[in-house]
């Protein structure tokens, strides 16, 4: 669980870095995304600490998520501000499902980890809703774009659990 969660939060920071590299620095979208990126960094810092503390082997795919995350962020931001927000919408939808599944798998086994996951999940839902409020669903090709990104997230999650 910690391996995939660390990988996911790392990927999130890379997606937002790619978007912020492209978006105009003072646009409302850039400001919103910078705020969300700061929260992803906090999530990542926490999983980095837990991975070290509990001696979890980190994913070997980190170099891939470094490049793929940044590319996904930059590509969606190059399409449009709304496409960048649709990317957040799609990613956070899958992360919400993933964290909900983990919470149910954990049950009462690990209260410390459950508390972190529940807190981060609430942040991710807030990111998804903020992206929608800011116009994500008006992105050109929204259904196709978000379906493709969600499918990619599911593949990334499955790979990061094992590799
Ligand atoms: Fe996060
Ligand atoms: Fe998020």
Image: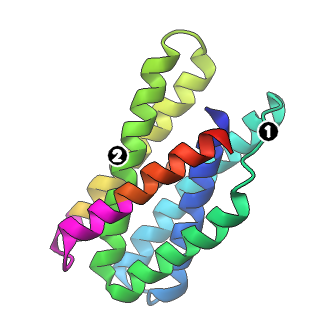
Would you say the magenta stretch is mainly helix, strand or loop? helix
Please report the residue visible at 32 percent of the width from the left and 81 percent of the height from the top: 81
**SS class of the residue under badge 1?**
loop
Any atom of ligand 1 within 8 Å of the CB at mark 1? no
**Real-space CA distance between mark 2 and mark 1, rounded to the nearest whole angstrom:** 28 Å
Give the quadrant of residue 38. Answer: bottom right
Q: Residue furthest left?
A: 138
Q: Quadrant of the C terminus?
A: top right
Segment colored magenta: 133-149
Residue 77 rendering spot, x and y as whole percentages: 40, 82
Residue 83 rendering spot, x and y as whole percentages: 30, 76
Q: Name the residue tied to disc 1.
A: 57
The answer to whether one can see residue 19 in this image is no
Please report the residue visible at 66 percent of the width from the left and 65 percent of the height from the top: 64
Q: Is residue 142 left or right of residue 102?
A: left
Q: Residue furthest top?
A: 108
- Label 2: few (<14), some or many (≥20) within 10 Å? some
Query: Dots 2 and 1: beta carbons under 8 Å?
Result: no
Residue 67 rendering spot, x and y as whole percentages: 63, 73
For the image shown, how many numbered marks are present on the structure? 2
Q: Quadrant of the N terminus?
A: top right
Please report the residue visible at 78 percent of the width from the left and 34 percent of the height from the top: 56
Residue 134 rendering spot, x and y as whole percentages: 24, 69
Please report the residue visible at 56 percent of the width from the left and 31 percent of the height from the top: 116
Residue 22 lies, with reference to residue 87, above or below; the image says: below
Confirm whether the magenta stretch covers residue 58.
no
Indicate which disc residue 116 carries.
none
Q: Name the residue tied to disc 2.
A: 125
């Amino acid at each position: 669980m910690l391996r995939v969660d660390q990988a996911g939060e790392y990927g999130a920071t890379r997606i937002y870095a790619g978007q912020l590299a492209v978006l105009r620095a003072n646009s409302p979208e850039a400001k919103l995304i910078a705020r969300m990126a700061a929260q992803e960094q906090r999530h990542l810092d926490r999983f980095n600490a837990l991975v070290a503390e509990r001696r979890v082997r980190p994913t070997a795919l980190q170099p891939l998520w470094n490049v793929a995350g940044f590319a996904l962020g930059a590509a969606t931001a190059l399409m449009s501000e709304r496409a960048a927000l649709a990317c957040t919408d799609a990613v956070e939808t899958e992360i919400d499902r993933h964290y909900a599944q983990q919470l149910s798998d954990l049950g009462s086994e690990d209260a410390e980890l459950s508390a972190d996951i529940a807190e981060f999940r609430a942040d991710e839902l807030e990111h998804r809703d903020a992206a929608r409020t800011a116009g994500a669903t008006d992105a050109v090709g929204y259904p196709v774009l978000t379906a493709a990104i969600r499918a990619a997230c599911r593949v990334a999650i499955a790979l990061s659990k094992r590799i």
